[in-house]
Image: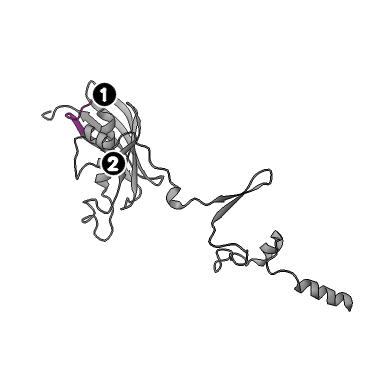
Amino acid sequence: MEASVMARFHLHSQPLFSSSPALSARSAPPLSISNPRPSTLALGLDIKNRFVTRCSVDGAVKVEAEVPVEKSFPPFPTVMDIDQIRNILPHRFPFLLVDRVIEYTPGVTAVGIKNVTINDNFFPGHFPERPIMPGVLMIEAMAQVGGLLMLQPEVGGSRENFFFAGIDKVRFRKPVIAGDTLIMRMTLTKLQKRFGIAKMEGKAYVGGNLVCEGEFLMATGSASE
């Protein structure tokens, strides 16, 4: 009888939130569709403090402050800014479709970006209820990145005699919408300086996903030819 009373007293004298990890885990409700996150009250956590706990190989526990999402993405590098692009390409508003060059290897490849915003002048008509960047303008933007590669001294071009001559094997994989950042890589695959012809391979991405690809033909020559 005395042992039974002592056992009941021992059970009811346990704290509500035990410091034991095992007991804390058992006290938390299981994860489910109706309860996708563990209860912070059941786990005894302060909801105001957001920390990430990491365990090292030697068993040491490190608590790091969680990085806010707005500080989680590094900026794009700048190899050519918009002023340098304007000094090379003859295009101007509303047809200059390259905002920055983030990678450039002379005579080999160039990577440019186009920040697609709802303020772009083509969205009111394409389409009013669903703003999608026209495929032909995606091709034009890629060709302009190719122009930045083509108009360099290493290739022998100039802004007075550069022309977009043709495209082949173009495929549109996904729509590009307002708010996207279009990343375009143009690679020089063949150059015939004697005839003033260059062939390029182009690929465009949004968030790492391929949205457009094709083969491009560029030509140099006077406007009268």
- How many residues crowd around disc 1 within 10 Å: few (fewer than 14), some, or many (20 or more)? few
- Residue at left offset 69%, top offset 59%: 21
- Magenta segment: 152-163
Spatial CA distance of label 1 from label 2 is 21 Å
Q: Amino acid at mark 2?
A: Asp
User: Hey, which quadrant is residue 27 in on the image?
Assistant: bottom right
* The C terminus: image quadrant: top left
Q: Amino acid at mark 1?
A: Pro
User: Hey, which quadrant is residue 29 in on the image?
Assistant: bottom right
Which residue occupies the foreground of this view, 15 or 192?
15
Which residue occupies the foreground of this view, 16 or 75?
16
The relative height of residue 137 versus residue 103 in the rendered view (above or below) is: below
- How many residues crowd around disc 2 within 10 Å: few (fewer than 14), some, or many (20 or more)? some
- Residue at left offset 23%, top offset 20%: 194
Which residue occupies the foreground of this view, 41 or 207?
41
Question: Which residue occupies the extreme left position in the image?
Answer: 224
Left or right: residue 115 versus residue 164 is right
Tell me, yes or no, whether the highlighted magenta stretch contains residue 19.
no
* The N terminus: image quadrant: bottom right
The relative height of residue 38 versus residue 53 in the rendered view (above or below) is: below
| Mark seen at residue 48 | none
| Mark seen at residue 153 | 1
Q: SS class of the residue under badge 2? A: loop
Tell me, yes or no, whether the highlighted magenta stretch contains residue 155.
yes
> Which x, y percent locates residue 129?
26, 61
Q: Which residue is mark 2?
A: 99
Left or right: residue 78 versus residue 143 is right
- Secondary structure character of the magenta stretch overall: loop
Question: Which residue occupies the extreme bottom position in the image?
Answer: 1
> Which x, y percent locates residue 33?
55, 66
Q: Earlier in the sequence, mark 1 or mark 2?
A: 2
The relative height of residue 187 versus residue 141 in the rendered view (above or below) is: above
